[in-house]
Image: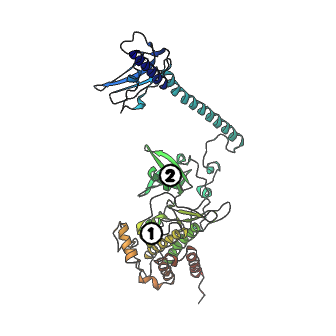
Amino acid sequence: MLTMLCAASGRVLLALVTLSLGFAAEELLCACDVPHCSQPNCTGKVCFVSKRREEGTITQHRGCFSQNILEHCHTPVTEQYGMKCCNSHMCNAELQIFLQGEDALVKTPSLPNLLLMIFIPLLSLLVLLALTALFCWKLAQHRHKHSDFGDTDLMLKASMMGDSTLEDLLNDDCTTGSGSGLPFLVQRTVARQITLMECVGKGRYGEVWRGVWHGESVAVKIFSSRDEQSWFRFIASDMTSRNSSTQLWLITHYHENGSLYDYLQRTALDVETCLGLASSIICGLVHLHVEIFGTQGKPAIAHRDLKSRNILVKSNRQCCIADLGLAVMHSQGSDYLDIGNNPRVGTKRYMAPEVLSEQIRTDCFESYKKTDIWAYGLVVWEITRRTVVNGIVEEYRPPFFDAVPSDPSFEDMKKVVCVDQQTPAIPNRLFSDSVLSALAKIMKECWYQSPSARLTALRIKKTLKKLNNSVEKPKPEQ
């Protein structure tokens, strides 16, 4: 009697456990691939999938249990063995188990799922391409109806203007020396229309070539794609491929005199030419520094890398400022200061004290304008050294040539300019001429250690204009 009671209690306990685990009491059809299966399925109380690792090889089996539920289904998953159970018909056919340390991503999708994974993205791509093609076709039809140029490829506007020249295209203002112009060279076909003739200069960041566009000489500055941050901020630009590499082109007027640095190397100046060069440079700097409002307006711009190598000399011996790759732009309306993303900070030899000491207010546009004034004073010093006074002229030398090495380091310049507070020595012979003496005074007022004490570009321009007027005034007859 006691034995029967115990057996009955055991059956009740097993039934309760079974119900608590959610396993069905009826027979289930399960997938079966264990060694003793004679068919691809079997019937039992519980379906299972198991996995075992032996000597680095993993084997997996599916089947069914008719008893010993607790013993098998509660087996913990280890690095060597694991099991999962389920309680619906054929539920173990897709059931997966992963041993400890086994990557779950190795699961191989079924063939239907694999086909879906391939064809759905492919179908989406085909639909997108079809819509894009339809849009482009509609756009081309619209341009054909409404454009003066019909179906022709985007080209420089001047190529449709008969005898138009690059001068017409850029609408250059000779009075400012700015080299500014209208943005007609944005179209990405300009590089195909230019033939490069000769390399006229090389620097750390690219080359300058003389090219021919529609029979006219143009200057092409070529950057490598590594210096894209400087290139993309220009207006007259194009991207092309040459010698199996991407190149970034800037197309401007070609000035056969080259840079002011080159011009001063080979040319001794008279006082009138000296004043003309200095005046045209400051006119360009004023044009950059001043914001112009209106439809043809421009933001205020600080150059940040003004030096004789970045100033071009025109055939009429007027200068224009070039290479605005480091320029800072500011608009009063939005109070937006665009300093770009270029890590270059300028040329060390021409850096102002606040830049070398890293005390410049980077959030204030006026700070950048003051660094241009410091550099302008150094450029004027270069010009006056090459000016003949009483038959005497000195060879060209860069600023601080007698104080720092030919390729000075940041620390070299910081010691000379910030610690020792040196400025270039002004030749005594300049003070024997009224014009050169006035230029010497301007230089000194560009080189104050305190940025706020330096002259503004507009103040310098007005002073030089008065000086020009006094020189041009005809002398009274004797």
Q: Which mark is residue 197?
A: none
Q: Residue at point 47% right, 80% down?
A: 444
Q: Label 1: few (<14), some or many (≥20) within 10 Å?
A: many
Question: The N terminus is located in which quarter?
Answer: top left
Q: Amino acid at mark 1?
A: Val
Q: Position of residue 403 (x, y in %)?
A: 35, 74
408 left or right of 283?
A: left
Determine which residue is flagged by label 1.
355
Specify the farthest residue to the left. 55
- Percent x, y of residue 258: 47, 62
Residue 157 is at least partly visible in this image: yes
Query: Furthest residue to the top?
Result: 38
For marks 1 and 2 on the same chain, the one whose residue lies earlier in the sequence = 2
Mark 2 burial class by Cα count in 10 Å: few <14, some 14-19, many 20+: many
Structural distance between the alpha carbons of marks 1 and 2: 30 Å
Q: Position of residue 271 (x, y in %)?
A: 50, 78
Q: For mark 2, what is the residue?
A: 249
Along the viewing direction, whichever of 387 and 362 lies nearer the viewer: 362
213 left or right of 346 in image: right
Residue 117 drawn above or below residue 187: above
Q: Is residue 314 visible?
A: no
Q: Quadrant of residue 64?
A: top left
Point 40% across, 26% down: residue: 74
Q: Nearer the viewer, residue 446 or 463?
A: 446
Assess whether mark 2 and mark 1 are in contact (beta carbons under 8 angstroms). Answer: no
Q: Is residue 452 left or right of residue 68?
A: right
Q: Residue at x 43, y 73 (%)?
A: 353
Place residue 294 in its image quadrant: bottom right
